[in-house]
Amino acid sequence: MPPQDDLTIRLATQADAAAIAAVHALCWHQAYGELLPNDLLANVTVESRLPARHRILADPSVACFVAASEAEVVGFADCGPCRGAEQECQGEVYALYVLQSFHGRRVGLRLLSSCATDLARRGCSSMRLWSLEENARARKFYESTGGRLVDRRSSARGSLVLTEVEC
Ligand SMILES: CC(C)(COP(=O)(O)OP(=O)(O)OC[C@H]1O[C@@H](n2cnc3c(N)ncnc32)[C@H](O)[C@@H]1OP(=O)(O)O)[C@@H](O)C(=O)NCCC(=O)NCCS
């Protein structure tokens, strides 16, 4: 698919909060419909994402980039210092989501590059991110952009055990 030519990547503001929450919720349903149980996904809505989004946008340690096509937010990425003091890695991409209808048009690549540039400006020489182990599309994308599997972790959500991989 050709790159999305009319795409703008910019830092998000509080005015983008509802649009980002909407992309976040829709992407969860699109990407994780086969990977996560319905009751967990049912709780992921624009309304449930909005308070956290306002907090993220107010956090000076987090840079949130949005990808906009004709003023519509079609993807976003959050990055900042690496969470987990034991990690040698310095920067982290906390979230990266692109609407399904824009996949394969280099939107993800441009958002990831914006995060890498932002973290490099802060002095980070490496960055990491966590992905669901079964999220094959995302893992292929990260591998194609130079990511390597470095760790694995499991966490429980009720009776559900989620395994994530670190790239
Ligand atoms: C993963 C995601 C961010 C990738 O974004 P994208 O815009 O579709 O990817 P891009 O078009 O920028 O891809 C860039 C390169 O990655 C590679 N790539 C992307 N998807 C790939 C796939 N499914 N298989 C193999 N390579 C892939 C290609 O080499 C591509 O370069 P090319 O255009 O020259 O072929 C996007 O698919 C997404 O949002 N998925 C749902 C949410 C999600 O899983 N987020 C990650 C949570 S950890």
Image: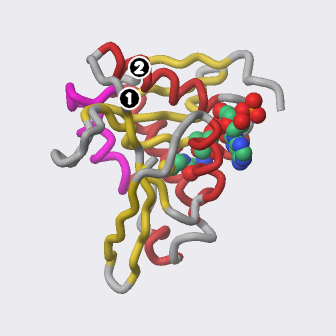
Q: Residue 134 vs residue 84: left or right? A: right
Disc 1 crowd rating (10 Å Cα; few below 14, some 14-19, many 20+) is: many
Residue tagged by mark 1?
A: 64
Q: Is mark 1 within 8 Å of ligand 1?
A: no
* Residue position marked by numbered label 2 in the rendering: 11
> Going 47% across and 17% down the picture, which residue do you hit?
10
Element carrying mark 1? strand
Q: Which three-letter amino acid code belongs to the residue tagged 1?
A: Cys
Chain part drawn in magenta:
48-63
Looking at the rendering, which quadrant does residue 33 occupy? bottom right
Residue pictured at 37% horizontal, 19% vertical: 118
Ligand 1 image position (quadrant): top right
Q: Is residue 35 left or right of residue 55?
A: right
* Residue kind at label 2, given as amino acid type: Leu
Location of residue 102 in the rendering, given as x and y in whole percent from the top left corner: 70, 37
Q: Is residue 131 magenta?
A: no
Residue 149 at x, y percent in the picture: 48, 51
Query: Which residue sits furthest right?
Result: 1
- Residue 102 against residue 3 in the figure, above or below: below
Closer to the camera, 103 or 14? 103
